[in-house]
Amino acid sequence: MKISVVGTGYVGLVAGTCFADTGNEVTCVDIDEKKVNSLKKGNIPIYEPGLSDMVRRNVKGERLLFSTDIKSAVEESQIIFIAVGTPPDEDGSADLKHVLAVARSIGTHMNGFKVVVNKSTVPVGTAEKVEAEIKKHTDHKFAVVSNPEFLKEGAAIDDFLRPDRVVIGVDNEEAADIMRSLYRPFVLSGKPILLMDRRSAELTKYAANSLLATKISFINDIANLCDILGADVEMVRKGIGTDSRIGSSFIYPGTGYGGSCFPKDVQALIRTANDHDYSLEIIRAVEEVNKRQKTVLVDKILDYFDGNIEGKTFAMWGLAFKPKTDDMREAPAIDMINSLTAKGAKLRAHDPEALSEAHRIFGDRVGSELELLDKRYDALEGADALIVMTEWNAFREPDFYLIKESLKTKVIFDGRNLYDPGRLKKLDIDYFSIGRPNGNGHVKPRF
Amino acid sequence: MHICVIGTGYVGLVTGTCFSEFGNDVICVDIDEGKIADLNKGKIPIFEPGLDLLVAKNVKEGRLTFSTDLKNAVERSLVIFVAVGTPPNEDGSADLQHVEAVARQVAESMNGYKVIVNKSTVPVGTGNRVREIVEESRKDNHSFAVVSNPEFLREGSAVEDFMRPNRVVIGAESSESVAIMKELYSPLYLIETPIVITNLESAELIKYAANAFLATKISFINEVANFCDEIGANVHHVAKGMGLDKRIGSKFLHPGPGFGGSCFPKDTRALAGAGRERGFEFSIIDAVVRVNDRQRQTMIAKIRTTIGSLRGKTIGVLGLSFKPNTDDMREAPSVDIIKALLQDGATINAFDPVAAENARQIMPDINYCKDTYETADGADALVFITEWNQFRSLDLERIKSLMKQPVIVDLRNIYDPAKMADCGFKYASVGRPVSATVR
């Protein structure tokens, strides 16, 4: 099939490349000429395992093209995916101006029946808006479909090729058939394609992300309660995760969720509901808890140093909002850095992938308040304490003797519960984590 | 092993019976002489599928006895399960007077090393409290261990849940008591049941956290359903799309009139209360409780909108228990809903396959019917409140012909809206458009 994907961000690039990989002819369109030129040269602007190889393979096989020419892309394609950004407005609602601008171009250049697919995460009701916008500019027949993406950064290729399910919101039989055959190669293992009305499809994306965010905020609340009660959240997590109705995924306590999806989608859902005079109480609580969670580890650090960290230097491991990505959008590390520097501390931070992103975000502050280091142990030099913010595999089994030797104060603040408190106690390193009895090691049954 | 179980309520009876089925010698103890006399005659005071047969079998084989003599039971047992009630106080916290009284009596009856196991759902810290009480009151300084071993039984499938649990949680403080508990649960090793061994506080919290999370899923999907009603989306599609995500899972994503029963309402309030006592605001659970209270009002409003004025109308109510396969009426949504309908001036004809007797005690002012069709007879509207299996394939034509007006409010989404419309019913459900069809 001939497909074009408008928008070469994270979602557009992964979707376009994976469709090309199953034999479709795909044109990825972007208005950013520089970006398109660099994609043509094989430079992938995002870090996603496996993506660049797959792009190269499909470019070479002439199934994947990059272009700035939306007109010919629309004319030559049967299916057009809209995968442009929907940045949050100041009030948390998704800004649809890019989506509607693409709809306008599609309508203007349409030369026959087209299936227009919303791949961007858009609020309920957007399919109708896109339809209305296209209709203003064309008399050709078309169908607007909602087909939300469920990609995890760091595992996006696998998620696209082997989805848990494909959700298609459609109110037109012809378009439904086309979408079904497009996705058939990805669900040969029997995973379902769910056909539904467009509003339900749009809501599914937000509801799924909001429930995952709910799991995270729930366990963070439990972790904080564990701190108060002297219970161990790691055991509580095991105890509840073995219940098949709960499951063990997404109940890892930490310093709050971040990234480009959860914070944005949670806010957008709250906002959409407000627009319909409905207040989603649980999701509002989830967001509030997440804000609070970003300060939990800061409070532990301040407590440890009696409220005074002026002139202290902290080594920080991890900047990305999660491992296997360079994404720092809404990363808890940013809040941590801001909180500590506001109190007069300096940081020496290391991340395996996110350093250039950090350079971009912190700008002039790099070199004064914040040093960015290529090697994890370099970050420890002259530092008073170590803070762990992202659970990269490389941080899981470090040389604790080297850490202890390097730090002025022998203390680790771990926002991801990577280490065994009992082991650190034996090493005589003070250790604070999330929801586990602090400092004095693991509370184990007194055997 | 010789064990006793103190308290012959729902949890105590299932626990004692199942342990005797594993081959242990079990004495179930209660202070209520009438109850023990009944049990000795083979009368089971609760409805739980399979339990009566299992009790009869183990009584006959001599492994299960019932008694009011706590002292004798403690003397003869190595492991003593405390499974007495912890009713909520007015502020939502659990009332521990029964647990504490039992701890004292056990202490006074000790004649050697005992493992005292809390099976009741008790607030974090209760294990420590029990230890203090036993230390104060025990005879001859006999040694003992306190264990927390929360139950995860679902009413309606409690026997199955006990025999094939997702996991066993043991909170303990000594290796000796852990070994004894593991021995007691060793029949489950064959089916590779995970055993989570931790400290007392964590084990106590696990029970509350698990129930609170399940309640969160219910309130979450109820909010999504209400929002679907606002925007014309279909909550079943949304729930299916969400539930197929392995990290979410499809369980507990069924919209309805809100959770009830003896666990979720009590445990969510208790968990929020435990935090609040210590200055911690458990925001999500507070929201879950609020949404659940609101859900009943939303359902009442839905009934009013669908039926119109209720004054002088006859409403048939199908299903009263808080969920199917139980006669438990505690905090059942039906109670709040029926109360509101009565206040509006409606006459209520109700049917429940099992819970009618219990319902009669709480709601003496409504008519109890012998079956579904009698309930439909002459009704201005039918309201489904509990999704008993027998309501799933009713003869709709017959129902329609019996009713004064063909109006159905289905609070459990048992039927397909499009099909109901085809049958000529005015039909409302939760979070689905009137025209929705099940694909």
Image: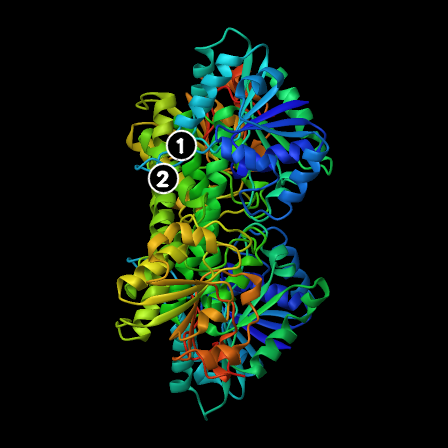
Which quarter shows the C terminus of chain B? top right
- Mark 1–mark 2 Cα distance, whole angstroms, equals 8 Å
Q: Residue furthest bottom?
A: B140
Residue A317 in picture, x, y percent from top left: 47, 64
Q: Which numbered circle lies on residue A202? A: none
**Amino acid type for the residue under numbered disc 1:** Phe
Residue B175 vs residue A301, the one in the foreground: A301
Residue B82 in picture, x, y percent from top left: 48, 71
Residue A79 in the image: above or below residue B122? above
Q: Is residue A233 left or right of residue B342?
A: right
**Quick check: can you spot residue B272?**
no
Which quarter shows the N terminus of chain B? bottom right
**Quick check: can you spot residue B8?**
yes
The answer to whether the residues at label 1 and label 2 have Cβ atoms under 8 Å apart is yes
Residue A398 in picture, x, y percent from top left: 55, 72
Rendered residue at 33%/54% (across/down): A364
The colour scheme used here is rainbow
On the image, numbered disc 1 is attached to which residue?
B227
Residue A304 in picture, x, y percent from top left: 33, 75
Residue A348 vs residue A244, the one in the foreground: A348
Residue B176 in the image: above or below residue B98? below
Q: Residues within 10 Å of mark 1 (few under 14, many from 20)?
A: many
The lab-note entry on whether marks 1 and 2 share a chain reads no
On the image, numbered disc 2 is attached to which residue?
A280
* Residue A101, quarter of picture: top left
* Residue A182, quarter of picture: top right
Residue A284 vs residue A393, the one in the foreground: A393
Question: SS class of the residue under badge 1?
Answer: helix
